[in-house]
Amino acid sequence: MTIAGENTEKQILIAARDVFIAKGYEGARMQEIADQAGINKALLHYYFRSKENLFDAVFSEVATHLFPAMKQLLEADLGLTEKITFFVKIYLQALHENPYIPAFVINTLNSNPERFLKYIKKSGINPKGLQQQIEAEAARGLIRKVKAEHLLVNIIAMCLFPFIARPIVQNIFDMKDEEYLLYLQDRQAEIIDFVLKSIAV
Amino acid sequence: MTIAGENTEKQILIAARDVFIAKGYEGARMQEIADQAGINKALLHYYFRSKENLFDAVFSEVATHLFPAMKQLLEADLGLTEKITFFVKIYLQALHENPYIPAFVINTLNSNPERFLKYIKKSGINPKGLQQQIEAEAARGLIRKVKAEHLLVNIIAMCLFPFIARPIVQNIFDMKDEEYLLYLQDRQAEIIDFVLKSIAV
DNA sequence: GTCTATACTCTGATAGAC
DNA sequence: GTCTATCAGAGTATAGAC
């Protein structure tokens, strides 16, 4: 593959990512992707045989960003308090840099679960270690006993929700765009505080 | 309109609701809606001039279910603890009865925000009263001081997330369908506990 | 109100020249 | 590798009979 070719492929993937994220699989148009990549439709099919293939290429790359560094962090050698603190900070930062990915993944996930299951296996997230850590720290009286399945979901839910449902939240609390960014920044400390207070003994 | 006509219209709306929720606006097919309603495509257009119109009819009805009884509850004459307890119970019950609505609304919301803004105004949810109540109870030393914008979002996020991201959650924790239902039941007490412990003084 | 048949448009995909 | 031109199918919408 020539250098020109690699460059074109990269341009296509960037354009495809933007369009698929904005419109979803069904709503996306090959023409729009071609336009945004500065090429024509035929070339899309030259590089990726079909819309389905192109989407898979985009999605497999994007889906890995949904749980950034989550696995490593869950298995890191840190106390639970530090782990939670780091996790929320890292996760919110990643979301700040990719604010539209969660809704895109959720959309794909629910409108076409089969497509999704191919990728989720890769995540490699295993809550067993977290559960053991929780039990250990609870036994030592550092935190109250809590189920990992609920704690993890609670934390992720609180981080993700303002990105998934932004128009609703922003509207209900009547915020301008700048105010919403401040609100999101605010949430970092709020979520950490909320969780740590909840699991305190 | 004749009785037969009203019945047909109702059948169309039921079928359209199912298909739009399962496939989203772009993914839905008028043919599939017609099939599921037991009629033909032409009749769809006789009752609702276009796909757009049909979707609006479905969505305006469905969107109101996203925040069931939330407004009344937020303004009810109850202590904060009771309010939170009731809210989580009522909300989770409503979600249990309509598990696919949140993902559908989120999907529509993000793939076509303009369409959504028409309906969100109706919700009438005003967090001001909640904020005042929080401040009042905090002043009396009943709870710690917390921002309504965060508390409300936290609670809703924790309730909604397992319905929005079910395939991910179910897969990560390796649950069968029955186990997931038990997990959802479990969450009612867990969320209430989680929140109340967090806002305790 | 309900149906069959069809018009018309959009869109993914391919053929073939350069 | 990249383009123009075009096909084939799908999908929304309408015409017109009953």
Image (tube, coloured by chain):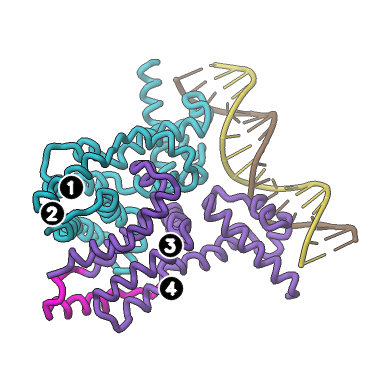
Chain colours: A purple, B cyan, C brown, D yellow
Evaluate whether residue B76 shows in this view: yes
What residue is pinned by disc 4?
A122
Secondary element type, mark 1 = helix
Residue B130 colored in magenta in the image? no
Q: Earlier in the sequence, mark 2 or mark 1?
A: 1
Q: For residue B143, which numbered disc appears in the image? A: 2
Secondary element type, mark 3 = helix
Q: CA distance from mark 3 to mark 4?
A: 20 Å
Position of residue A43 measured from the top left corner of the image (x, y, whole percent): 72, 60
The amino acid pointed to by label 3 is Leu
What residue is pinned by disc 3?
A95
Magenta stretch, residue numbers:
A123-147
Q: CA distance from mark 2 to mark 1?
A: 8 Å
Position of residue B135 measured from the top left corner of the image (x, y, whole percent): 18, 47
The chain ID associated with circle 4 is: A
Q: Nearer the viewer, mark 4 or mark 2?
A: 2
Badges 3 and 4, same chain: yes
Q: CA distance from mark 1 to mark 4?
A: 43 Å
Instruction: Give the residue at x 39% y 32%.
Output: B13
- Tag 2–tag 1 contact (CB < 8 Å): yes
The amino acid pointed to by label 4 is Lys
The chain ID associated with circle 3 is: A
Badges 2 and 3, same chain: no
A175 sits left or right of B68 in the view? right
